[in-house]
């Protein structure tokens, strides 16, 4: 099960809507071994495509160095689908390289860039993808984590 705080959930949905009609992509990092998504990092879709996403290689290298220095791992890897349901495509499955990560998909096919809608008005689903095997998991959106640490958002320009 993916447990994610409301602020991070809302940030992922907002990023997905903002980049519509192109696919959005990003990472939520967390402390190594915790399975707790804490630091939202919206990334640039280098492909700038409504049907495909690709992390910019320089941004990704910078992100992994930063996570390593902070003893973090990618707890969530997310992207949006702009015209289809929130389910991993064959391409998504073949590119999944983080067996411990939650792969989140947000479908913006019906709501697009509309900003007046609540976050729950989108299709937000999480999957585990290991060795080409896809397993959907429940998503538990909590108002905040019990330990009192606020999640953060980092923006790469």
Image (spheres, rainbow, N blue to C red):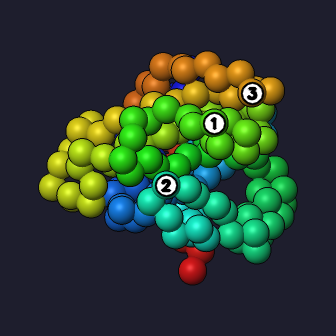
Q: Of callouts 3 and 1, which one flags the residue occurring earlier in the amino acid sequence?
A: 1
Report helix, strand or loop for mark 3: loop
Which residue is depicted at the point 44% across and 36% down? 86
User: Which mark is in front, 3 or 1?
Assistant: 1
126 versus 98 height, above or below:
above
Instruction: Find disc 3 in the rendering and name its residue.
Output: 132
Report helix, strand or loop for mark 1: helix
Instruction: Find disc 1 in the rendering and name its residue.
Output: 90
> What mark, if any, has residue 51 been given in the picture?
2
14 versus 2 height, above or below:
below
Report helix, strand or loop for mark 2: loop
Where is residue 74? Give x, y as percent. 70, 46
> What mark, if any, has residue 68 been given in the picture?
none
65 versus 34 height, above or below:
below
60 versus 80 height, above or below:
below
Where is residue 131? Give x, y as percent. 80, 27
What distance separates the C-alpha of mark 2 from that of mark 3?
20 Å
Q: Name, please, the residue furthest toward the bottom.
A: 157
What distance separates the C-alpha of mark 3 from that of mark 1?
9 Å
Tell me which corner region of the image, top left, top right, bottom left or bottom right, holds residue 112: bottom left
């Amino acid at each position: 099960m993916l447990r994610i705080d409301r602020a991070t959930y809302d940030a992922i949905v907002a990023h997905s809507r903002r980049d519509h009609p192109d696919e959005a992509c990003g990472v939520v990092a967390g402390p190594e071994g915790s399975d707790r998504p804490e630091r939202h990092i919206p990334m640039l879709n280098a492909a700038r495509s409504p049907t495909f996403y690709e992390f910019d290689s320089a941004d990704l290298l910078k992100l992994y160095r930063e996570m390593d220095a902070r003893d973090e791992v990618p707890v969530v890897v997310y992207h949006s689908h702009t015209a289809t349901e929130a389910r991993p495509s064959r391409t998504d499955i073949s590119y999944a390289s983080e067996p411990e990560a939650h792969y989140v998909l947000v479908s913006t096919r019906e709501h697009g860039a509309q900003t007046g809608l609540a976050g729950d008005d989108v299709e937000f689903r999480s999957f585990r993808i290991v060795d080409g095997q896809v397993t959907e998991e429940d998503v538990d959106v909590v108002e905040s984590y019990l330990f009192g640490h606020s999640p953060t958002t980092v923006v790469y320009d």
